[in-house]
Image (tube, grey):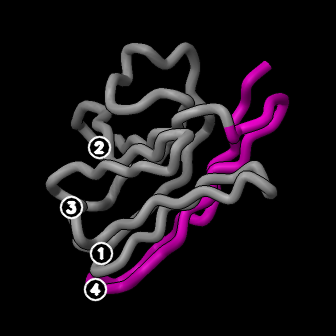
Amino acid sequence: QLQFVESGGGLVQPGGSLRLSCAASGFTLDRYAVGWFRQAPGKKREGVSCIRASGNTNYADSVKGRFTISRDNAKNTVYLQMNSLKPEDTAVYYCATVCWNQFDVGSWGQGTQVTVSS
C-alpha cells in the first residue's frame, strides 16, 4: 500500500521558514511524480508544487519564488522548503503521487499543520 507520512510543520512568524518532509513507505518513490497540496480552514484543497520523476518542478503562482520542492530518492523522501512565509500560507499540507489534480488522489495522509502568525 502506497503511504506517505508528512512532517515538519509548526508555528512560525511571518517571514520565517519551514521545511516539510514527505516520507514514502511501501513503495520506491523514484519512479513517481509527487505533489504537495494544502488546505486552509474553510477553503478547498489546492496544489502547491510538483516534482516529476525527471526532477522537473512546478509551482503555484502564490508560492513561486518562495517555496522549493526537492527529492532525495535514497531517503525515499520529498521535501518542501518554504521561505518568506505569509499568514495566507497557513494550512494543512499533504503530499501524494499526483500533481495538481486532487481528485486523482485515492487517499490522503494525515498531513502536517503549518501556521504562520505573529
Question: Tag on residue 85?
Answer: 1
Q: Which residue corresponds to mark 2?
A: 41
Q: Quadrant of the C terminus?
A: bottom left
Label 4, label 1: how many angstroms apart (C-alpha)? 5 Å
Q: Is residue 50 magenta?
A: no
Amino acid residing under circle 1: Leu
- Mark closest to the chain's N terminus, 4 or 1: 4
Tell me the SS state at disc 1. Answer: loop
Check whether the beta carbons of the residues at disc 4 and disc 1 lie within 8 A of each other. Answer: yes
Label 2, label 3: how many angstroms apart (C-alpha)? 11 Å
Residue pictured at 40% horizontal, 41% vertical: 37
* Closer to the camera in the image, 112 or 56: 56
Label 2, label 1: how many angstroms apart (C-alpha)? 17 Å
Q: Position of residue 16 (x, y in %)?
A: 36, 85
Question: Tag on residue 88?
Answer: 3
Q: Can you see residue 118?
A: no
Residue pictured at 22% horizontal, 62% vertical: 64
Tell me the SS state at disc 2. Answer: loop
Q: Position of residue 19 (x, y in %)?
A: 53, 71
**Identity of the residue furthest to the front in this view:** 54
Amino acid residing under circle 2: Pro
Q: Which residue corresponds to mark 4?
A: 15
Amino acid residing under circle 4: Gly
Instruction: Say left or right for 15 vs 73.
Output: left
Mark 2 burial class by Cα count in 10 Å: few <14, some 14-19, many 20+: few
Q: Magenta span covers which residues?
A: 1-30
- Mark closest to the chain's N terminus, 2 or 3: 2
Q: Is residue 20 magenta?
A: yes
In the rendered image, the vertical position of residue 16 relative to residue 113, given as above or below:
below
Image depth: mark 4 or mark 2 in front = 4
Amino acid residing under circle 3: Glu
